[in-house]
Image (cartoon, rainbow, N blue to C red):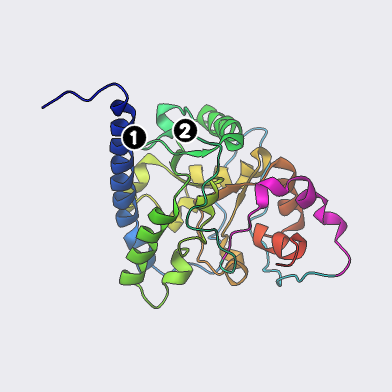
Amino acid sequence: MAKPSGWQWPAIRYSLYAIISMAVWACAIEAASPTVTAPLPTAPPPQVQITFAGTPTPDPALAPIPKTTLTATPDPACALYIADSHLLTPIVDRDSALTADYEPLDLETPSLAYRNSYIVPIRIRAEVIQPLKDMLGEANEFGLQIMAVSGYRSYEEQAVAYEKWKRLYPDRADTISAAPGHSEHQLGAAIDFSAPFMEEQYGQLFHTDFFKIDEGRWLYDNSPRFGFTLSYPAWAEQTTGYQWEPWHFRYVGVELAQELVSRKITLAEYLAQCAPAP
């Protein structure tokens, strides 16, 4: 067989990488299946007391807040939306979708410490890389081991995940998984985190008990300082339309992430108030 010429090698390597990535992603979502067999709580579990010197501890027991509606007069608190709209648009939720061919132009593979990586490296937007590395680096200093498992996910990859949940739980798949085009992962700014021992303890990478372990609690308490927000908290299921995912965080910038904490609202509620009507 003739040896591939030099210009063919990049295409071959890219194809192999894509095949491996899809295989790993399929295994990851298959491993996550048992999560929904246990009833998900309607509120965060009792706070696990963890002490980290010099780190703030926001109160997780936040009461649900009714969905806000757009008004004729812009809310002054929406200034951050105007300033950082590039981080928040296109808007992606149950009602607003991305096109099948949408892909951020600045996707990169971050060079993470071995303890923070999981098999195939993730891809995320360039702007998210340094905040992610800073956050994981500080967690490492506390002896924690937080893995970035899933970052950018294409429309096709999300379709695989969604169809899997539709087969397993047709009556509630839409509360477990985003339909293709409706996933924050396609924006390249959302990351699913886990810890190495989650699979050993729970038989899966993603489980609601992630909130109870040190890694999950530390992320919840400290991620806003690095610009990340928990997209789907337990206390906001009626607002987001999705069941609790204590592992799913989205980068929105430090100012807005801390604003959401201070106002005790989710990103979905903030966008409902501040984003222009379609």
Q: Indicate which disc residue 14 carries.
A: 1
Across and down, in percent, residue 213 comes to: 47, 47
Tell me if 251 is positioned left or right of 254 in this view. left
- Of the pair 246 and 86, the residue shown nearer to us: 86
Please state which of residues 156 and 223 is positioned toward the viewer in this rendering. 156
Q: Amino acid at mark 1?
A: Tyr
Secondary structure under badge 2? loop
Tell me the residue at 56%/70% (across/down): 241
Residue at (66, 37) in percent of width and height: 55
Residue 29 falls left or right of residue 47:
left
In this rendering, which labeled residue sits more in front, label 1 or label 2?
1
**The residue stretch that appears in magenta:** 72-93
CA gap between label 1 and label 2 equals 14 Å
Looking at the image, residue 112 lies above or below residue 82: above
Q: Is residue 7 visible?
A: yes
Q: Which mark sits nearer the N-terminus, 1 or 2?
A: 1
Q: Which quadrant, please, contains the C terminus?
A: bottom right
Locate residue 195 relative to residue 124 in the image: left or right.
left
| Vertical position of residue 143 compared to residue 148: above or below | above
Residue type at mark 2 is Thr
As helix, strand or loop, the secondary structure at mark 1 comes to helix
Quadrant in the picture for the N terminus: top left
Q: Which residue is mark 2?
A: 109
Who's the residue at 66% across and 51% down the image?
88
- Residue 190: image x %, image y %? 54, 48
